[in-house]
Image: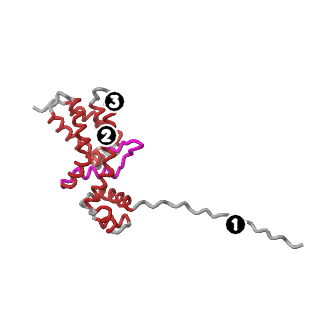
Amino acid sequence: MGAVSVTRPRPKVLAAPRVKAQPVRDRILEVAERLFATHGMSGVGLRAISADAKVNLASIAYHFGSKDGLLEALFAQRAAPIAQERLRLLQECHERAAKPTLEDILDAFLRPALGLGTEAHPGNPAFIKLRARLATEPEALSRKILSKAFDASSRAFIDAIAAALPELPRAEVEWRFHFMLGAMFYTMADSGRIQALTKGRIDPGNVKKALHHMIPFLAAGFRSAPVA
């Protein structure tokens, strides 16, 4: 009696899960953010962005019109959560106390900017660097973009600081707010200068520690006697 041939079913080959392609617009924004943060707006051309994002120049023109339009779109997308988180934290300050402390107000302003966000609004290192770069560029476009993104929330904080320090003239509060922005942007830029001076003992890249030291320093400056 001959052997019976048994045909075994072939094992099913599972197809690899498809990875959803990143939308072209989002890819352009991500690449532009990284390149602008590293080289500055004037140091990056649209050809470099299109090459890195693996899209043609027509795609950038279609979605954003120009390099200026690309930067405006990037800020519109990235800056809004920072401003909203600042105002949410400021509201929490007022809910906890009828008169919030100066330190709590400063923390609410600085924490989102330095990237110490929440799970809903995590920090974005590339955008932090880009903001620091843009703040030092004197171009009219950068001023317009920063103004549109942050003026409303910043004025709310100037009002809150003035209410916490009623003995200070308004102009003094505004000058000191300006100096706080300088400290904030330089910390965000993390140029490496203080690391070189201290052989790495001081590292602004550790933003939690930087904020821990920055708030008492700034609060003391805000509380100092008015300039004669």
Which residue was labeled with disc 2? 86
Which residue was labeled with disc 3? 95
Total labels: the figure holds 3
Q: Could you tell me the amino acid type at mark 3?
A: Glu
Quadrant where the N terminus lies?
bottom right
SS for tag 1?
A: loop
Q: Residue at the left extreme?
A: 228
Which residue was labeled with disc 1? 10
* Numbered label attached to residue 105: none
SS for tag 2?
A: helix
> On the rendered structure, is 181 left or right of 91?
left
First in sequence: mark 1 vs mark 2:
1
Marks 3 and 2 sit apart, C-alpha to C-alpha, by 14 Å
Q: Is residue 140 above or below residue 95?
A: below
| Residue 77, x across and y down, in percent | 33, 52
First in sequence: mark 1 vs mark 3:
1
Residue 197 is covered by the magenta coloring:
no
Give the residues drawn in magenta, as a range: 110-139
Between 57 and 204, the residue placed more toward the observer is: 57
